[in-house]
Amino acid sequence: MRPIKPRSCKVFAENLDCSLPKRKQILGDSGSTPFSAAVMNRPRIRTFSLHCRERFGQAVGKIPLDLGITCPNRSKGGCLYCCPASFTPFSLRATDPIDEQIRRGKQYLLRNRFTRYFGYFQQETATAMATARLLPILAQVLEDPDCLGLILSTRPDAIAADLPGALANLVDQTSKECLIELGLQSIHPASLRLLNRNHSYQDFLAAARRIQAVGNLQLGVHLILGIPGEAETDMLTTVQTVGNLGVQALKLHHLQVIRDTPLNTLYEQGSVAVFSRAEYLELLLRLLPHIPAKITLHRLWSTAHPNLLVAPRWQSLTGALSKELQRLMTERDIWQGQQANSK
Ligand code: SF4
């Protein structure tokens, strides 16, 4: 594998701030549910940035942290598309102790843009670590007054029976927050099989119910748009189904083909199609109205390192994508939740 150059903070910032402009015109004259004046002045998408400004009165960053463990799915071949280096920022070194990872995250990622942050365990599958070992590390992260909470990105089959209760206690004791992001990608069994996820939609539902049962944890879901074999109706079904589960957050992104993955082999064989930039923006314009307005969208696109990315290569920074999406939503008077059952 060729060496990976440092990943630019500008690209990484897509997770942190992609707010869109406000809806200004009177809505509700197209047969959809009318919005109140207060709601009309809200932005067209509930971004993470907007959520943080409402919740904390300021923009908040994320510092990726690495426990140095391996995802259990790797022993089963790993997910078709997965390449850990593609989502590892240059500042993060798994061999560093957690306090050094936080220090470097503040120095290289937050810089002068953010004074507060979430500890973001996105690498591998953090909750595969036994709860008794994991909790002290999480508690250590929360000790930092600048840290407002945790985001744990994980798999549905890696939520130990004792984890939700232990996390809920930690949240109670520290008065901070904890969002658990469950990787689902699709509700469709054929897609989960193709991606080699090695869990079912029922596994996801069981984990989601256990997380939601403890009350003070937030639940997010990670979905991929453009899985080979899925039509737009399949993606819409996934988005609508997940949107109605009472989740607080969604991470959506287009399928990216990363070097040295099984997906890349399929792509080279010609059996994988990827979205053009215009196709993906049009897809978002059709899907976003079906996502309830109260759900925070932490991500709308992937940002794999250019040295690893095979396709699609849009040559666009996320800021430009956000601007283009906002222009199209304004032009066509589209907003998140416009056609959702629950708003
Ligand atoms: S579950 Fe996540 S970390 Fe594990 S192989 Fe799949 S994508 Fe990679």
Image (cartoon, grey):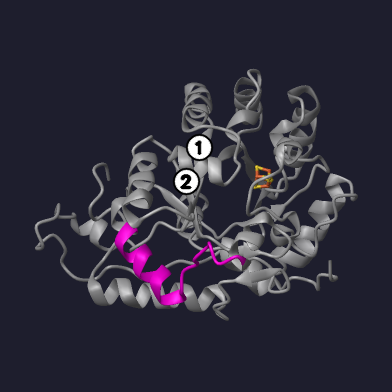
Location of the N terminus (image quadrant): bottom right
Instruction: Give how far apart the Cα atoms at labels 2 and 1 are.
Output: 6 Å
In the image, the residue with mark 2 has its CB under 8 Å from the nearest atom of ligand 1: no
Looking at the rendered structure, the kind of residue marked 1 is Leu
Q: Is residue 172 left or right of residue 46?
A: right
Q: Is residue 44 left or right of residue 117?
A: left
Residue 2 lies, in percent from the top left, at 84, 71
Residue 265 lies, in percent from the top left, at 66, 61
Looking at the image, residue 18 lies above or below residue 79: below
Q: Is residue 273 magenta?
A: yes
> On the image, numbered disc 1 is attached to which residue?
219
Residue numbers of the magenta segment: 269-287
Q: Residues within 10 Å of mark 1 (few under 14, many from 20)?
A: many
Name the foreground residue: 48 vs 142: 48
Q: Is residue 205 left or right of residue 102?
A: left
> On the image, numbered disc 2 is attached to which residue?
249
Q: Is residue 22 magenta?
A: no
Q: Residues within 10 Å of mark 2 (few under 14, many from 20)?
A: many
Q: Residue drawn 73% across and 73% down?
A: 307
Looking at the image, residue 150 lies above or below residue 16: above
Residue 88 lies, in percent from the top left, at 74, 58
Looking at the rendered structure, the kind of residue marked 2 is Ala
